[in-house]
């Protein structure tokens, strides 16, 4: 039997959900997204669990959505078949990307992402759904999909995480932001040596777990409501529709077709799976 794509363990009041596809830099396919969701179910139902850590096995946090599973060289799953029409593509991304991520954002218990290595595109979207982010000193953040025609990913986290000015540069110029700059910009809470990432995140989680659960839940909801009242959810809804408009433009469709014909997506996939920046 192959390794589970997500590892789940509970230490005291802290549950740790670990993405476990290190061989592809934790590229997110349907199985991984489902397994993360199921692990959050488990953490949500366990009254002993007060804080959830979202971590990643291997050198990199996540290289984003698994494009190979979407258009590439693996057997199509139910969702990939659905993506053959614009309607199906919309439904797939609504359920598997938008709703699954918002569920983490809205999760009643505090969450902490532990990020090492590359955190790319939908990897950044996933980390940004967590309440706190602790980065290892080798962490870097990027969202280079614009040059591949994509209108960012499904949730526009960048202006909320970086400020609009930096978000524009980050996306339009395909900036890669290192750990120290991420801390300076407020994208991450703190940067720690890679070797002590797990210990530091666990110590922080234990500290958060000292807050009575009902208090933590209400304060988290109230902090999130601050963002709501600033229009975060509406801006995300707008972006999701805009994102889909761009998916279905002649520009995006012909680029996808062109890459399929040339087989040059393979190089893009492989670069992503190694955690390199796509060119
Ligand atoms: Zn999309």
Image (cartoon, grey):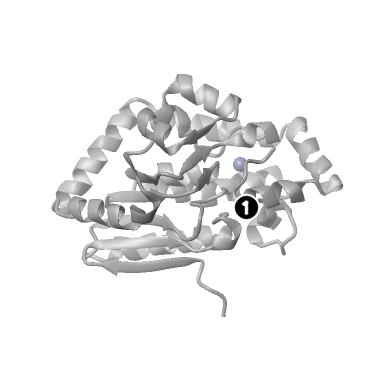
Of all residues shown, which one is farthest toward the right? 261
Residue at point 62% right, 52% down? Answer: 274
Residue at the extreme top of the image, as rendered: 165
Q: Residue at x 58, y 34 (%)?
A: 152
In this view of the protein, can residue 82 be seen by the observer?
Answer: no
Q: Position of residue 114 (x, y in %)?
A: 38, 51
Q: Could you tell me residue 75's position as x and y percent?
A: 72, 64
Split into quadrants, the picture shows ligand 1 in the one at top right
Residue 276, quarter of picture: top right
Indicate whether 132 appears above or below 9: above
Q: Residue at x 73, y 50 (%)?
A: 84
* Residue at the spot 22% in from the left edge and 48% down from the top edge: 217
- Tell me residue 68's x, y (percent): 69, 55
Q: Which residue is mark 1?
A: 274
Q: Nearer the viewer, residue 199 or 262?
A: 199
Q: Is residue 43 or residue 141 the one in the foreground? A: 141
Q: Residue furthest bottom?
A: 1
Secondary element at tag 1: helix
Q: Is residue 212 above or below residue 160?
A: below
Q: Is mark 1 within 8 Å of ligand 1?
A: no
Pick the quarter of the image with the C terminus. top right
Q: 174 left or right of 6?
A: right
Dividing the image into 4 quarters, which one contains the N terminus? bottom right
Classify residue 19 as left or right of residue 92.
left
């Amino acid at each position: 039997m192959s390794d589970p794509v997500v590892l789940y363990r509970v230490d005291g009041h802290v549950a740790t959900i670990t993405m476990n596809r290190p061989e592809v830099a934790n590229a997110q396919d349907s199985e991984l997204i489902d397994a993360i969701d199921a692990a959050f179910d488990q953490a949500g139902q366990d009254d002993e669990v007060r804080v959830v850590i979202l971590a990643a096995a291997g050198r990199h946090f996540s290289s984003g959505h698994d494009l190979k599973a979407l258009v590439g060289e693996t057997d199509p799953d139910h969702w990939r078949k659905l993506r053959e029409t614009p309607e199906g593509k919309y439904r797939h991304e609504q359920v598997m990307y938008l709703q699954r991520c918002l569920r983490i954002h809205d999760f009643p218990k505090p969450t902490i992402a532990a990020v090492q290595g590359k955190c790319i595109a939908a990897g950044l979207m996933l980390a940004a759904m967590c309440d706190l982010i602790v980065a290892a000193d080798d962490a870097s953040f990027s969202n280079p999909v614009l040059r591949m025609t994509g209108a960012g990913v499904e949730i526009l986290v960048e202006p909320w995480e970086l400020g609009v000015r930096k978000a524009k540069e980050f996306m339009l110029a395909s900036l890669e932001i290192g750990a120290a700059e991420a801390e300076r910009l407020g994208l991450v809470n703190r940067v720690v040596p890679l070797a002590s990432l797990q210990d530091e995140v666990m110590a922080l989680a234990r500290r958060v777990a000292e807050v009575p659960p009902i208090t933590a839940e209400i304060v988290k909801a109230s902090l999130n409501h601050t963002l709501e009242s600033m229009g975060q959810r509406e801006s995300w809804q707008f972006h999701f529709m805009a994102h889909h408009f761009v998916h279905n433009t002649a520009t995006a469709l012909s680029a996808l077709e062109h890459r399929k014909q040339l087989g040059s997506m393979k190089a893009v996939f492989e670069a992503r799976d190694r955690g390199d920046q796509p060119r």
